Amino acid sequence: MIKATATKVLAGGKTMGREGDIELVSIEYHGDVALVRLNRGKTNAINLGLTQKLRETLKEVQKTSKSLILCSSNDKFFSIGWDIPELYYLDREGFAEFYRAFTGLQVDLYTLPMPTIAAVTGHAVAGGCILALCCDYRYIADGKKLMGLNEVKLGVPIPYPVDCILRSIVGTRLARTITDFGEFYLPEESLKMGIVDCVTQLEEVVPLCEEKATVLGALPEKARVAIKRDRTEPVERQILQHLEEKEKIFLECWFSREARIMLEEQMKKF
């Protein structure tokens, strides 16, 4: 498994986390807004290293900024989701370590006590869609940019945290359709379903996110933190109450023969 080592670059921005010579996550500060960019290759495939560095980055941003934009360093992929070719070969202990870290990341991002916006300039599918859903708002570029949760087509359930989060965003009925069928949706479809809040031209996504993040971050801090906490606390409580049992179910599915076959087919797309 590829390991990541921590680093910080202070000139013109702060970077945390490297994989070889590649910076996994970079931070650009635009006033009180932190732009957190995923930078793990073209697809931003999620592994343990990227997950850990994102969690560290969230802690760092809380000390320096009033709002956060999560985006990609390229316009093709926000994130393709989990790095299946890497995760597939982990033993049960190794995969459980990743899964718990990714679960922690979902909760950390969802409950972060500041406004968060996902600037989706490329495909955000599976784990990439999960990261976007954990943000307060989602802006997506028009065109052929896909979002969706296709876990069922890989033989595994939706990770429990985002299952709860999705239901709170779009309601149980639409969440049922999204998770049961595992389809990917174009921007206008995502907007109609309530998965995203805005569809705009590619070059406008990040600027519009910055504008909204600036406005939200300037609101009275104690009030906006309390409002967000009231919204996220019941969902977080539900997640934590059932997390251990849901993890066992996910791991059983992940290592099942049926899922192994589906994951092997999926790896051919990487």
Image (cartoon, rainbow, N blue to C red):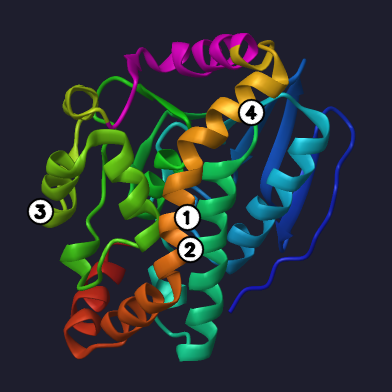
Question: Which residue, given by chain and number where applicable, does mark 1 sit on?
Answer: 237
- The quadrant in which the N terminus is found is bottom right
Q: Residue 208 at what x, y percent from top left?
A: 50, 11
Magenta residues, start to end: 195-215
Which of the marked residues, 3 or 4, is nearer the chain's N terminus? Answer: 3
Circles 4 and 1, Cβ within 8 Å, touching? The answer is no
**Residue 117 shows in the view:** yes
Q: SS class of the residue under badge 1?
A: helix
Instruction: From the image, state whether disc 3 or disc 4 is nearer to you.
Output: 4
Camera-side residue: 85 or 168? 168
Which of the marked residues, 4 or 1, is nearer the chain's N terminus? Answer: 4
Question: Which residue, given by chain and number where applicable, does mark 2 sit on?
Answer: 240
Residue at the image point whose x is 69% and y is 44% from the top = 58
- Badge 2 crowding class, 10 Å Cα cut-off, few under 14, some 14 to 19, many 20 or more, is few
Q: Amino acid at mark 1?
A: Arg
Which of the marked residues, 1 or 3, is nearer the chain's N terminus? Answer: 3
Above or below, 156 against 181 in this view is below
Q: SS class of the residue under badge 2?
A: helix
Above or below, 119 against 91 in this view is above
Q: SS class of the residue under badge 3?
A: helix
Name the dominant secondary structure of the magenta segment.
helix
Total tally of numbered discs in the picture = 4
Residue at the image point whose x is 26% and y is 51% from the top = 149
Q: CA distance from mark 3 to mark 2?
A: 26 Å
Question: Which residue, given by chain and number where applicable, does mark 4 sit on?
Answer: 225
Q: Amino acid at mark 3?
A: Phe
Q: Residue 215 at what x, y percent from top left?
A: 61, 8
